[in-house]
Amino acid sequence: MRQQVQVGEVVFGGPSTVLIAGPCSVESLDQMRVVAQQLKDAGVHILRAGAFKPRTNPHSFQGLGQEGLEILAQVSRETGLPVVTEVLSENDIEAVEAKADMLQVGARNMHNTALLKALSKTSLPILLKRGFAATIEEFLMAAEYLVHGGNNQVVLCERGVRSFEPQVRFGIDFGSLALLRELTAFPLVVDPSHATGQARLVRPVARAAAALGVEGIMVEVHPDPSKSVSDAEQAIDIEEFHGLVQDVRAIEGILQPDGR
Ligand code: PEP
Ligand code: MN
């Protein structure tokens, strides 16, 4: 039996797959307004976008920070969509908590036990992403840090692990997901965008995730993918997202009631 995790009115572990979508980064109020309205019309449940970005290169765009949080909160008010965004450091928890409905722990921070301990004291649900070299045990222990500290509102996100193959960004670990469904009651989410790193692979991998009966799918959608300031190659446009939603709903329709 899946544990249910509620974000606003949205329930992970309820009857339908939760769709989380939005750009990699908050870039401007205009960008977020346009994409949030497009996504709302397409049936998205939760809006995503980073205000604090964990970039590989320190010279790359690091996110709008507090201004990004304000933009997220405003667009959330205007559309009624709840928001998930990353908490990069302990110092940002209070600021992000004040503006978001769900807090994201990024893959690079899954092993950051000080951050996990601090987040365990918040009352907001947590989207915990798997580190890209984390074992299943380490992933589950990271979640245990949150539970142990007092926050059991945890959703686990598989976003691909590092493999020998350079042509896809990360290797999505479907076998581990199937096993995680046996090992834990936490709702499971798949992120095909960061896993594949390529826009045209996002929809087929989302289909595979839906077939596994995961509780949620998170993808990067940009109003104009070629202009995305981060992760442009993997961003899909709204048209592709509409197709993805259709696919996910169709697959859900053929799963047995115990498929998830
Ligand atoms: C993200 O989802 O914004 C992100 C940075 O992903 P990850 O931590 O999985 O790389
Ligand atoms: Mn990204």
Image (cartoon, rainbow, N blue to C red):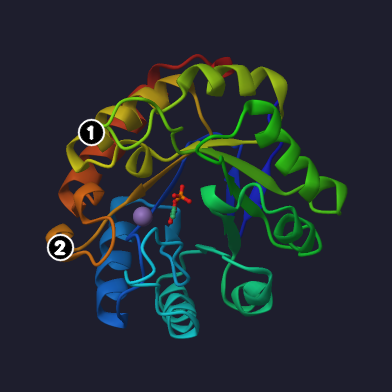
Residue 189 placement (x, y as % from top left): 51, 38
Name the kind of residue labelled 2 in the image: Asp
On screen, residue 236 versus residue 101, left or right, reads left
- Residue at 50%, 64% (x, y): give it: 83
Looking at the image, is 65 positioned above or below residue 146? below
Kindly identify the residue that appears in the image at 66 percent across and 72 percent down. Answer: 93
Query: Percent position (x, y) of residue 231?
Result: 28, 55
Could you tell me residue 75's position as x and y percent? Answer: 40, 76
Q: Amino acid at mark 1?
A: Leu
Q: Which residue is mark 1?
A: 201
Q: Which quadrant holds residue 225?
A: bottom left
Pick the front one: 191 or 30: 191
Q: How many marks?
A: 2
Q: Is residue 260 visible?
A: no
Classify 148 as above or below 190. Answer: below
Which residue is more in the foreground, 257 or 197? 197
From the Cβ of disc 1, is ligand 2 less than 8 Å away? no
| Label 2 Cα neighbours within 10 Å, binned few <14 / some 14-19 / many ≥20 | some
CB within 8 Å, label 2 to label 1: no
The alpha-carbon separation of the residues under discs 2 and 1 comes to 18 Å
Q: Which mark is residue 224?
A: 2
Q: What is the quadrant of the C terminus in the image?
A: top right
Q: Is residue 10 above or below residue 251?
A: below
The residue lying at 28 percent from left, 62 percent from top is 230
Secondary structure under tag 1 reads helix
Q: Secondary structure at mark 2?
A: loop
The answer to whether 227 appears left or right of 206 in the picture is left
How many other residues sit within 10 Å of disc 1, few (<14), some (14-19) or many (≥20)? some
Residue at the image position 35 percent from the left and 47 percent from the top = 219
In which quadrant of this rendering is ligand 2 seen?
A: bottom left
